[in-house]
Image: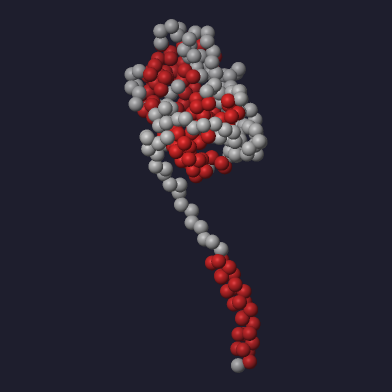
Amino acid sequence: MTRISSYVVATIPALVVLGFFVWFANWIPQTRWSPPEKQDIGAAMTPPQLAKVGKIIVRQRGCLACHTIEPTAGVKGQGRGPNLANIAARRADGAAGGPDGLIDYLVQALYEPGAFLVEGYANIMPGSTRPPAKLSYEEVVAVVNYLQSLGGTPSVKVGDIPRPPGEAAATVSVTDPAAMLAAFECSNCHSLEPGEVLLGPPFEAALLKRVAAERGVSAEAYVIESIVHPRAVEREGFPEEVMPQDYGERLTAGQLQAMTVYLLTREGGE
């Protein structure tokens, strides 16, 4: 009997401590993670209304994992991506780089973030319509308005900006390579005019064939590789890691073949 009593006395403190931690754990507010809710965005929404939705999207879709919003910190901030605070005002003050207009700049930054990189930052951001953000066109419009509101006034309605390049390209006929080049916005970086150089190498058939010969491969193989794996060989004298890496997924085999033939045989390209 004495031994049982001693055992009970010895276990009482342990039970008290255990009970305290059970109570404390249940006292802490419990949270449950749930995926971000899809935002209801109507075509009739005003830019200020869209900006409010855009603010929610920026916080829900992980944008602030890399970007910061730090007033008075300038473009640098403390994030892995540029500081978004007062971005509209900074562009209005003449911040260099990318398209001139604020809306064009923001649209390019969301659709093709690697097209222009702020000095000091790496090309790590995926296009906003791709994972992990996977923004719809309407959500992109909302985010553009929110970014406009950071130092400026929202002004964009649904339908005012282009749809994602991939959406446009999906409807392009494989028999019309020139239309594909426009839909994929290739001419923003590559010139079709002999002797003209933009951001990337020009689309001159003679030049493409000469580079292919120097590499010891067929012209067709070189063009296809340049489209599907643009980082395999990057031409000296041109910015690195600018061209999107997903054309192999966005182009069908027929589209890729049609574009290759067009670039190597188009009139005036020899």
Q: Residue at x 37, y 38 (%)?
A: 42
- Write the residue at 65% across / 33% down: 74
Q: Is 242 displayed left or right of 140 in the figure?
A: right
Instruction: Please state the horizontal and vertical placement of residue 115, each as a whole percent of the image.
Output: 53, 25
Quarter of the image with the N terminus in it: bottom right
Visible residue check, residue 19? yes
Which residue occupies 33% across, 19% down? 175
Compare residues 32 and 205 and report the one nearer the observer: 32
Seen in the image, is 215 located left or right of residue 135? right
Compared with 222, 77 (above or below) is below
User: Residue 10 at what x, y percent from top left?
Assistant: 64, 82
Q: Position of residue 17 (x, y in %)?
A: 62, 74
Q: Quadrant of residue 251?
A: top left
The image quarter in which residue 270 lies? top left
For image coordinates 49% across by 32% down, the residue present is 154
* Foreground of the two, 197 or 145: 145
Q: Is residue 224 visible?
A: no
